[in-house]
Amino acid sequence: MPDLFAVLAEPSRRLILDALRTEDGLVVKELTATLGLSQPNVSKHLRVLREAGLVTETVERQSRRYRLRPEGLREVETWLEPYRRFWTRRLDDLGHHLDTTDGSEQR
């Protein structure tokens, strides 16, 4: 399986993931129209996203429908958790400071 962070480093792939957040997913033709990318380019990125476990595909008549596979982002979620805790503490500290400041301090 490819390195998830390397896969997500490509801006076009992030755009595709954003577009696929719809519940029904999209077919390649819809993705090309939505994103303004060429069909071969979209197909190339979808293959990489599929191999990384970030999207699924189903065959519908003569096209393929792609859907976001959110559990594929679990590695990113795990990596972000310590940073989220860090910022939550910082924002809590700021909130506490603002709550205890009476506003009479002048600059």
Image: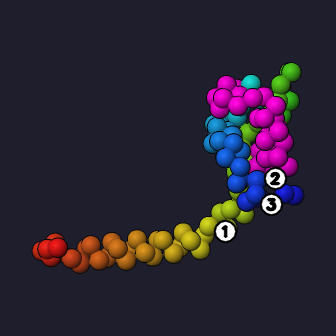
Rounded to the nearest whole Å, what is the CA distance between mark 2 and mark 1?
A: 16 Å
Return the disc, 3 or 2, that comes first in the chain's sequence: 3
Crowd tier of the residue under label 1, counting other residues whose Cα lies within 10 Å: few below 14, some 14–19, many 20 or above: few
Q: Which residues are magenta?
A: 30-57
Q: Is residue 45 magenta?
A: yes
**Percent position of residue 73, x then y:** 71, 56
Crowd tier of the residue under label 3, counting other residues whose Cα lies within 10 Å: few below 14, some 14–19, many 20 or above: few
Q: Nearer the viewer, mark 3 or mark 2?
A: 3
- Please name the residue that numbered disc 3 is placed on: 3
Q: Is residue 67 magenta?
A: no
Q: Is residue 80 left or right of residue 85?
A: right
**Percent position of residue 83, x then y:** 56, 71
The three-letter amino acid code for the residue at tag 2 is: Ala
Q: Is residue 17 visible?
A: no
- Please name the residue that numbered disc 2 is placed on: 52
Residue at 76% across / 57% down in the picture? 6
Identify the mark at residue 79; answer none if there is no mark: 1
Return the disc, 1 or 3, that comes first in the chain's sequence: 3
Image quarter of residue 42: top right
Residue at 70% across / 34% down in the picture? 25
Q: Is residue 26 above or below residue 54?
A: above
Q: In what element is the residue under mark 1?
A: helix
